[in-house]
Image (spheres, rainbow, N blue to C red):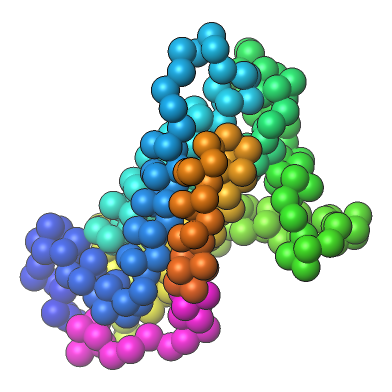
Amino acid sequence: MTDVHDELTLQEKETLFGSQLNQQFPVLWPCLEQVIQGAGRVFAGCPPLPVHEISDSELASRTLMARLITDLYAVCILAWKGYLAQTVALTSSTLETAYLLTYIGLNDKTARQWLDHPDATQQIVSVFNLIQGSLSHLDHPTGGLWTPQELEEHTKSEYHIYQQMCGVKHLNAAMQMPLGLELRPGEGRITVGPQFSETFFNVTLWTLYHAARMALQATDAFARGHAPVTALAQFKNSLPATERLMADLLGYLDRPLAPSVAEE
């Protein structure tokens, strides 16, 4: 059994997937673009300083912010070409960068611990503690303080998202098989490159939503701690528009896909 994609080259599939992704989720690229540009403006607004003239937290945070922006842009390149497993794998690393950036904050001691860390196989703390520590530095959604139970529950929720992404990165079959096996009536095929299933589009959306959400959160923390007043003000002014796009993007997660070439 064949479909309209069987005769396409890999490059043609990449182009078609990106086009259909835009058709299914029209707000997706404007949202990611807004997050990337906002982060870029905040980073560019920081004056250049010799390394020996800035604090440890400033040095670590600028390094991580540059990595965050670069990774997020690379995530988008992979996603719009239809390389879902690779998108998810890189996003798991992007989330770690966002957590670490927020975790360090203005703490020079923690920053120096990270900068001097000698073990290339381990982080300075576990990812679970990294998430919990970063959340403790953020405002509670209601504006109050986190209770220990709320902090624990929210940490577990964030960690579960991260674990799911790592399941793809580390080739856990429960996560890999749905993304690598293309099922059709009466048959299943292992394919190379983009797929055009509902699962593929929805997992791409889910991944990019969390990439944008965490990048925005980390940018906000960086801007408040390290950006000059003008750059912080510019970021704050753009935040309502970005948050509206994020809310629209969240709405797609529970919405069925529109008819597309994949279903013809």
152 left or right of 85 in image:
right
Q: Is residue 20 visible?
A: yes
Number of labels in the image equals 0
Establish if 56 lies above or below 183: above
Q: Nearer the viewer, residue 195 or 91?
A: 91
81 left or right of 174 in image:
left
What is the quadrant of residue 130 in the picture?
Answer: top right
Residue located at (23% from left, 66% from top):
18
Q: Nearer the viewer, residue 245 or 156?
A: 245
User: Which residue appears farthest toward the right when viewing the image?
Assistant: 148
Residue located at (47% from left, 86% from top):
255
Q: Nearer the viewer, residue 13 or 56?
A: 56
- Reply yes or no: does residue 242 show up in magenta: no
What is the quadrant of residue 203 in the picture?
Answer: bottom left
- Reply yes or no: does residue 255 show up in magenta: yes
Establish if 257 lies above or below 95: below
Q: Position of residue 121 (x, y in %)?
A: 60, 23
Residue located at (91% from left, 55% from top):
148
Q: Which residues are magenta?
A: 247-264
Q: Position of residue 3 (x, y in %)?
A: 17, 81
Q: Is residue 165 visible?
A: no
